[in-house]
Image (spheres, grey):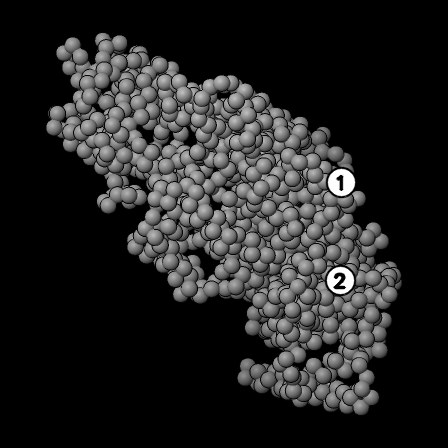
Amino acid sequence: MDEALDERDLERKLKKEHKAREKEEKKLKAKQKEAARLQTQAASDGARKSEKKQKNKGAIDENPEDFVDPDTPTGQKKLLASQMAKQYSPSAVEKSWYTWWESSQYFAADSASSKPPFVIILPPPNVTGALHIGHAITVAIEDAMIRWRRISGYNALWVPGMDHAGIATQVVVERKLMRERKLSRHDLGREKFLHEVHNWKDQYGGTILGQLRTLGASLDWSRECFTMDSQRSKAVTEAFFRLYKEGLIYRDIRIGHWDCTLRTAISDIEVDYLELKEETLLVVPGYNTPVQFGVLISFAYPLEEGLGEIIVATTRIETMLGDTAIAVHSQDERYKHLHGKYAIHPFNGRKLEIICDDDLVKTNFGTGAVKITPAHDTEDFKAGKRHNLEFINIFTDDGNINEIGGPQFEGMPRFTARAAVIDALKAKGLYRGTKNNEMKLGRCSRTNDIVEPMIKPQWFVNCNTMAKAAINAVKSKEIDIIPPQYEQDWYRWLENIRDWCISRQLWWGHRVPAWYVTLEDDEEKDMGSYTDHWIIARNESDAILEAKERYPGKKYQLDQDPDVLDTWFSSSLFPLSVFGWPDDTADLGTFYPTSVLETGMDILFFWVARMVMLGILIGGDVPFQKIYLHPIIRDAHGRKMSKSLGNVIDPIDVINGITLEDLQKKLEQGNLDPDELEKAKEGQKKDFPNGIPECGTDALRFALISYTSQSDKINLDIKRVHGYRQWCNKLWNAIRFTMIKLGDQYTPPATVAVYSMPPLCQWILSVLNKAVGKTVSSLEAYKFSEATSCIYSWWQHQLCDVFIEAIKPYFNESQEFEAARGASRDTLWLCLDIGLRLLHPFMPYVTEELWQRLPQPKEACRKDSIMISEYPSAVQEWANDQVENEMEIVLDAVSKLRSLRPPTDIHERRPSFVLCRNLEIAATVQCYQAQIATLASVSSLKILTEDDPTPPDCATNIVNKDLAVYLQLQGALNTEAEHEKLRKKREEVQKQYDTLSQKMSASGYREKAPQSKQDDDMKKRSSLMEELEIISEAESKLDANN
């Protein structure tokens, strides 16, 4: 045994020495050639290659400045370093390109163009907003669409805008005033407060627009607008005026969500719901101590006529001050004797009728008796309407008990009154206890205040007719909703639509264009006392004229409604107003309706449906032809992003990178309470122990788009984003390799004769052609993740992993490969030019930088930027199924050979063999013999026939029934491991054989399956049987050789 080892060691030593001598001889020859080239100053690729080798050895000093981009003046085309940096750097690559694109007006569309329009309206971000991950996915998808259409021959327009964000902006400015000057808006008064808001907007607002530029958003900034600029304000007033004249806007007293901190009605989207399981103490704005929620409080109402008492239960005991009735179920035997009787309110003596309401009362909940407060509960409001009850509001706008609540409680904040009412009930002997109660509690997302149901006079839009039109638009396919599963949600919401409350009790926003006439002889002087005294006009002058006509000879006072319009009202007009409506503009004629509305599914109803309703009614057509709804982004664990969890991801942090320390500092600058802050910090430490690495804009965009296949939610993992950043480095290196191999004197050909090229070149162009077709069809079908997957697969697995690796031997200066070397250069250039243009809509920065480094074709008029170059289209002549099928066999053989290498055998190349069982396979393998050897990293590749003996000491793998591969391990063969491989392969093939046999012997197969299918199955079964026989043969030979 020892002697055998010595012999093998000696053999290895001799082999290594032989290799070392060969290597030294090659180095000597290379140096000699290099010296000759330096003497003649020839600029061939051989010189570049040798120079690179010498540089790596330190023979020639590099100038670091050659690898650094010079400073580029703002707005000018980026100046590139004379040498490509050795590694991809997102911050270096993404610098300067955007300002050049923008100053070159590449983003601008032309209303007079004869090209077909493709139009997207950017969902207008809030003026207060900073970039968040939802904006990032919106920009990634929309910019990919607009860049693709722009270079596909469309008059592409992407319109930027900004929303005045009524509530959000007012909250920000009010907090600033209180923090810096200890003043409320009421201390300042309306005019001075609005002046403060405008100042804030001019100074701080719109930060997000700059951040959109960082993301590479190719928006037409010449059309930028703001929902409260003069043209958009004109549109809002005109829409309100027209809807009122058509009888669709009216004023009524209804119940709705009220924020006592803001003193305004708020919409459903501004309410967050907490699910409480039991008694919970919560911090509420304006209260020094936490407030109790999640309990059901029982108390008794005394009955008249000495009938005893009736016990009711409530989660909001303070609202009992506004009770006007008690409801029971008509079939509840416990209360049948009390129908039509009265209870007496213990604090004000009010008589409360006991009524029957089977819709409201559940006999198995609580006591089966329900107190009714029509002015402060949504369901009670409906019951009040059904039974014509009195509606008593007991709260002031800021949430204190008013005079109607009684002198005992007047002036108390509502939750202070909660405790006071319980104490007062106890004093009267009417308190009956408190118990835990599961409930949903609404909080305002802006202020964290508990939402209070309140009745208020408001302006409403009757949506019934418009909703039917919006339903029909989708049913008739005037509008396509993508993904289509949201169509049913669309129908369900619109079929059950309620009238839309469009007034808000704010100061920042579009003032309601309504004026109230108070006549001198009116008995009631409060604004709104008489519904018919309202005048709707486009401006105050028109209102004065109408008042004079309506009330000739009478003395009156004219006052504009102080309320403003819901922000969603102006946003819903955006597809019209951005193009100048109500004026008849060139933009409106060319670009309306728009092509696609892309947004998150969470605002499908609050914004998208309302745009469709108003667009059809006012604009005369649907506002867009397609609705694309992207998924909602969650963290890597599938949790909703929340500041309190510490899992909110700032896209700028992903682009630039950030340390854990700085992440934690950002948390500390927020408004989390100490417990939440600690929890959030722990969450960050767990998810980002080393912070977030610099990923760059391109990688972030590509990752977000690639995620869109994940139905309605995206579980965003930063590791995946960073993986695409590393992939950008792969692209970078592919271009560096190409520039070296092309040489300084290379000029791309104007045309190429594909069929005269080597098979490998034909193959890469054929699969590129297929990738182009698949990408375009995926984009047309709004299957963006399929497009990114297709592009990634071609670049990574076909170009970089196969083609570039396989052509490297062609560049060893041998005359034998001269023709292949020339064809490879041309093919490589074609692949990179087309591949970069294919990728550009998804990764705009790195593709621009790399494309600019590619040499230009001779006598060709190349565009100045990749973003205005033509998008690739399939070339029919490049399609070559035969070559693709051959390469499929080749790559399968390579994969099987690679799998035979021992894990420790990283760099050593070993002899290999290919057993071909028919002439066709043998011809294919012979044609690609050099490529198989190169890609499999073997020292030699010999083709065997069935008559040849199996080489000794070989691991084997079955490619298919006609092809097997062997790798000579020369002492490293593990017989047991090879037997195990063959056993697993046998199990796999046997399972396929058994499944197919079972299917073919099933009842009805011969009668139902088409003959062609039966023939295919028969061939496949025969093939599987042959594979099983080959595996058995391989097992026998393995045993015989060992």
**Displayed quadrant of residue 324:** top left
Element type at marker 2? Answer: loop
Mark 2 packing: few (<14 Cα in 10 Å), some, or many (20+)?
few
- Residue 829 vertical placement versus 646 (above, below): below
Give x and y (percent) for residue 29: 76, 88
Q: Residue at x 51, y 46 (%)?
A: 126
Specify the label residue 864 is tagged with: 2
Distance in Å between CA atoms under marks 1 and 2: 57 Å
**Displayed quadrant of residue 1031:** bottom right
Between residues 435 and 73, which one lies in front from this camera angle?
A: 73
Between residues 168 and 648, which one lies in front from this camera angle?
A: 168
Give x and y (percent) for residue 478: 67, 31
Q: Residue at x 70, y 51 (%)?
A: 108
Specify the label residue 1015 is tagged with: 1
- Residue 310 vertical placement versus 422 (above, below): above
| Residue 892 at least partly seen | no
Residue sticking out furthest to the front: 553
Element type at marker 1? Answer: helix
* Mark nearer the viewer, 1 or 2: 2
Q: Is residue 727 left or right of residue 51?
A: left
Q: Amino acid at mark 1?
A: Asp
